[in-house]
Amino acid sequence: MSGGQEADYWPLSGKPFFDMILSKSHVHPRYNLFIPSRMHPLLPSQDTRAVLAYKDKTWDVMLFTKGKRFDYSWRQFVDDNHLKIGDACVFELIECLSTKVTFKVQILRGDFPADLLAKVSGETAGAPIVIE
């Protein structure tokens, strides 16, 4: 790190985390990101403000109790960081209060080859990306 910029990748701190390889439903209209069930017991039981921290910026989203998912404001994080299908995010739970949850996010670019992208859907677990 130099010049006040945070490194793109860093070791996890040992706090709880989840990772997600982004699919169409994460980065295109509906912009749904559901948090894996193994994380649910660690999160507040009511709708809560969540902060996504990446590099030197933060984004506010709502974490909904029902389904443990981020609200539509997750789209701003997607757009600002140019996320696309095949990119991966690691969400490390840094702070968890009843009024606010903070995730430190790492973005790992997928850079799926453009000539193959048109041949796959990868929209659901039932329609995975398969490379022959």
Image (cartoon, helix red, strand yellow):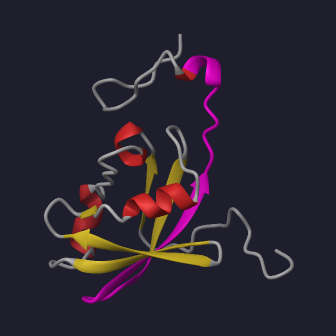
**Magenta stretch containing residue 132, yes or no?**
no
Is 86 on the left-hand or right-hand side of 97?
A: right
Q: Residue at x 29, y 55 (%)?
A: 36
The image quadrant of residue 124 is top left
Q: Where's residue 75, x and y in %? A: 41, 58
- 56 or 130: which is nearer to us? 56
Q: Residue at x 52, y 19 (%)?
A: 118
- 35 or 28: which is nearer to us? 28
The image quadrant of residue 22 is top left
* Total numbered labels: 0
- Judge whether 124 appears above or below 47 on screen: above
Q: Where's residue 98, x and y in %? A: 24, 88
Q: Which residues are magenta?
A: 94-116
- Judge whether 86 appears above or below 108 on screen: above
Is 95 on the left-hand or right-hand side of 13?
A: left
Is 75 on the left-hand or right-hand side of 4?
A: left
The quarter of the image holding the N terminus is: bottom right
- 87 or 90: which is nearer to us? 87
Q: Where's residue 20, x and y in %? A: 43, 49
Extreme-right residue of the structure: 2
Is 44 on the left-hand or right-hand side of 26?
A: left
**Magenta stretch containing residue 107, yes or no?**
yes
- Judge whether 8 appears above or below 4 on screen: above
Q: Residue at x 53, y 10 (%)?
A: 132
Extreme-top residue of the structure: 132
Q: Where's residue 122, x and y in %? A: 40, 28
- Judge whether 30 appears above or below 23 on screen: below
